[in-house]
Amino acid sequence: MFFYWVFVTVPAGNNSLTISETITTGNFSTPFLLGGGSNVFNSSCGSVSETITQNTTTGLVSVSFNAPVAGTYIVSIKYNSKSIAGAPAPSPTTTVHYDFQIVGDPGSIQGLDVIKN
């Protein structure tokens, strides 16, 4: 398992965001799937009621939550690293680069290299 953690500043009320998962090396096409345990936390690390779903074809993750007050929240998305097992091997290289980010927020990008062993 691995996590994508990101801070978001939102108004009070219902909020939604989309997290993209992009393979930038062009040599592989299998997205990581969610593992159990994704969550949204307030600034005191208390859980906030949320709904988190994933399009398993594109890897897009939708996060919806109700912020009791305006402020900074922490979105924690848990991915299952074994969910790509059995996919066709990357070619011509054995390294695959993934980028994760909130759609429309270039400052939220985080990358991951996966190396076939």
Image (cartoon, rainbow, N blue to C red):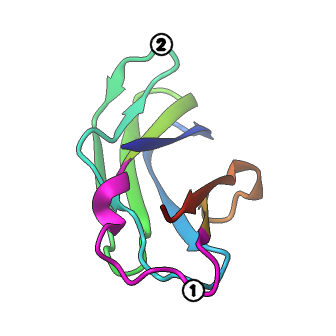
In screen coordinates, is 33 left or right of 10? left
Between residue 97 and residue 95, name the one nearer to us. Answer: 95
Which label sits in the foreground, 2 or 1? 1
Quadrant in which the N terminus appears? top left
Image: 35 above or below 58: above
Residue 36 on the magenta span: no
Magenta range: 79-95
Q: Residue furthest top?
A: 44
Label 1 secondary element: loop
Question: Where residue 31 appears, x then y in whole percent?
Answer: 42, 71
Few, some or many residues within 10 Å of mark 1 (<14, 14–19, 20+): few
Question: Where residue 10 appears, x then y in whole percent?
Answer: 58, 40
| Amino acid tagged 2 | Ser
Name the N-terminal-most of marks 2 and 1: 2
- Disc 2 to disc 1, C-alpha distance: 45 Å
Which residue position is annotated with label 1?
Answer: 91
Image: 22 above or below 1: below
Between residue 107 and residue 22, name the one nearer to us. Answer: 22
Few, some or many residues within 10 Å of mark 2 (<14, 14–19, 20+): few
Question: Where residue 96 appears, x then y in whole percent?
Answer: 59, 69
Q: Quadrant of residue 48?
A: top left
Between residue 1 and residue 108, name the one nearer to us. Answer: 1
Query: Residue at left 37%, top 40%?
Result: 66
Checking the image for residue 44, the label placed there is: 2
Residue 82 on the magenta span: yes
Q: Quadrant of residue 6?
A: top right
